[in-house]
Image: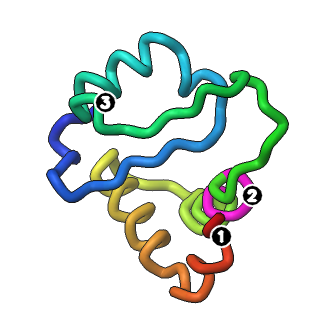
Amino acid sequence: MCQSIFQSNVMFQQNGASQHWSSDVRRSLDKTFLQQWIGRDGHPRSPDITPLDFYLWNYVKDRSCYTYRDACDLRHIITETINSVIPFRWTKIEY
């Protein structure tokens, strides 16, 4: 993970992909977030669809899926896209 992007007030969230729950990833999250992250203990191939899977990542992909110069440019595009989500949409994707 890119340590430079993490700040004390950041909320890091992943979608439900099974590779995000491997032991290597969990160790990295423990180290990066000092064991202050909330995981899930369920089966890694759960059929549950998270709000991120269902709405946000498709929204971001549809609006940022074009050529970008570098990782900083991509980060900027993704940040702008997420910030463009109308506030009432956030309440609709909460669970």
Which of the two residues, 81 or 25, is positioned nearer the viewer here?
Answer: 25
Residue type at mark 3 is Met
Task: Tell me residue 71's x, y (percent).
Answer: 33, 45
The circle on residue 54 is 2
Which of the two residues, 72 or 43, is positioned nearer the viewer here?
Answer: 43
Q: Residues within 10 Å of mark 3 (few under 14, many from 20)?
A: few
Task: Tell me residue 65's x, y (percent).
Answer: 59, 57
Q: Earlier in the sequence, mark 3 or mark 2?
A: 3
Residue that label 1 marks: 93
As for residue 55 lying within the magenta part, the answer is yes
> Mark 2 and mark 3 in contact (Cβ < 8 Å)?
no
Numbered marks: total: 3
Q: Would residue 82 appear left or right of 58 to someone viewing this image?
A: left
Quadrant of the rendered image containing residue 44: top right
Which of the two residues, 80 or 90, is positioned nearer the viewer here?
Answer: 90
Quadrant of the rendered image containing residue 3: top left
Residue that label 3 marks: 1
Residue type at mark 1 is Ile
Pair 3/2: label in front: 2
50 lies above or below 34: below
Q: Residue furthest right?
A: 47
> Mark 2 and mark 1 in contact (Cβ < 8 Å)?
yes
